[in-house]
Image: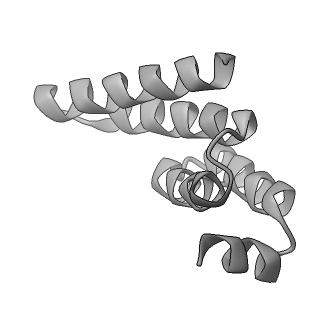
Amino acid sequence: FARALLETAGGADTVLKRADQALAASQPQLALELASVVLRAEPSRREAHTTSAKALQGLAEASSNTIERNLYRAAAWAHRRSAER
């Protein structure tokens, strides 16, 4: 399904570009959702992991809940590690 979505949207690069625009517009949840579609179709896509990490960090910074903030930070760390591989 994710691959079909990417094909319909013009490919992973197009979706990641839109995710970066969402980040720039302070929409980290949208950026994370878009990057997740790419990662479902292409799990090793470094750019999608990097975008996910940035989005999760943004969500962590916006959260006032300590537990939620730490969950977002841990997930961001995992995506940064995946981007480095």
Between residues 52 and 82, which one lies in front from this camera angle? Answer: 82
From the viewer's perspective, tell me whether residue 50 is left or right of residue 54.
right
What residue lies at 23% left-to-right and 24% top-to-bottom?
Answer: 70
Picture mark count: 0
User: Residue 10: x and y, percent?
Assistant: 87, 73
The one nearer the camera, 65 or 5, is 5
Q: Residue at x 19, y 35 (%)?
A: 68
Foreground residue, 69 or 1? 1
Residue 27 location (% of width, % of height): 53, 53
Residue at point 67%, 38% (across, down): 44
The reply, left or right, for residue 72 in relation to residue 46 is left
Q: Position of residue 51 (x, y in %)?
A: 63, 38
Q: Is residue 11 left or right of residue 75?
A: right
Residue at image position (52%, 29%) is 79
Position of the N terminus, as image quadrant, is bottom right
Question: Based on the displayed image, in which of its 4 quarters is residue 2 positioned?
Answer: bottom right
Q: Is residue 4 above or below residue 41?
A: below
Q: Nearer the viewer, residue 51 or 4?
A: 4
39 is higher (above) or lower (below) than 76? below
- The image shows residue 70, relative to residue 11, as above or below, that is above
State the colouring used for the structure image: one colour
Q: Toward which corner of the image does residue 5 lie, by quadrant?
A: bottom right
Q: Quadrant of the C terminus?
A: top right
